[in-house]
Amino acid sequence: MPIERAEREGTASWDLLVDGRRRRRLRVTLILDPALALVAWVHFGPPMSDNFRKAYRQLLRWNDELPFARFAITEDERPVLTGEVPADALDRDVVGALLARVLAICDLVHEPALSVMGELRRKHAEYVKTSGDPDPAGVALLESYAGELDELEG
C-alpha cells in the first residue's frame, strides 16, 4: 500500500506498507537515483533499547548469511535492511523482485528478530492484535517472485 511519495534534486522516493506471511506492516522506502540505483530501505524495527549487543550481533550474522541484503543500525539506533538494484536494469519485474526479496528476508528472520528485539516484539504484537487479517498484496508479491527467492525459503 503506497503511503507517501517525494522528489528532491532528481531523486524520487516512495513509502510503502506491506504485509508478509509472518511480518506485518513493514515500511519500505524505495529511493531511485536514475543515474545510480534503486534502493529498498526497510524500516526493520523501532529503536533498539534492550539487548542491543545481542541484536547487533544477530544483524551482523544475517549480513553474512543472506545474499544481496544488508542490515545496519541508523544513528538513532533503528535497525534497517537495504537491498538495491542498478538503475540501468530497472523494469517492473526487477522492482517487484527487489520488494519481494526484502519482504521474504523480513519473513525469514521474523521470529529470531522478535526474540532479540523487545520493542519490535511489543509493537508487532499490538499491531497484529488490532489490525485483523494481513493485506494479501504482500503474500501475492512473494508468490509471484517465489522462483527468484528459493535461497530464502525458511
Image (tube, rainbow, N blue to C red):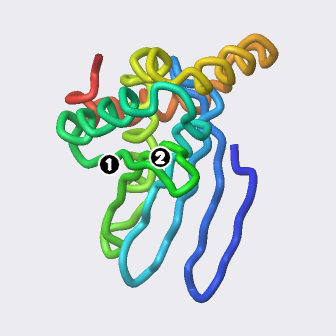
Quadrant for the N terminus in the image: top right
The residue closer to the viewer here, 104 or 41, is 41
Mark 1 or mark 2: whose residue is earlier in sequence = 1
Residue at (47%, 46%) from the top-left corner? Answer: 80
- According to the picture, the residue beneath numbered tag 2 turns out to be 80
Residue at (70%, 50%) from the top-left corner? Answer: 2
The residue closer to the viewer here, 79 or 81, is 79
Quadrant for the C terminus in the image: top left
Measure how far apart labels 1 and 2 are at the Cα level: 8 Å
Position of 7 with respect to 103 (left or right) is right
Residue at (74%, 17%) from the top-left corner? Answer: 126
* Rendered view: 134 above or below 95: above
Q: Position of residue 99 (x, y in %)?
A: 46, 45
Q: Position of residue 6 (x, y in %)?
A: 70, 71
Circle 2: element type: strand
Amino acid type, callout 2: Val
Residue at (37%, 23%) from the top-left corner? Answer: 108
Residue count near mark 1 (Cα–Cα under 10 Å), binned few <14, some 14–19, many ≥20:
some
Count every numbered label the image shows and give the total: 2
Q: Position of residue 127 (x, y in %)?
A: 73, 21
- Tell me where residue 150 sits by quadrant: top left
Q: Position of residue 114 (x, y in %)?
A: 50, 18
Q: Which mark is residue 90?
A: none
Amino acid type, callout 1: Arg
Task: Farthest residue to the right: give it.
Answer: 130
Position of 21 with respect to 37 (left or right) is right
The residue closer to the viewer here, 30 or 150, is 30
Q: Which mark is residue 70?
A: 1
Circle 1: element type: strand
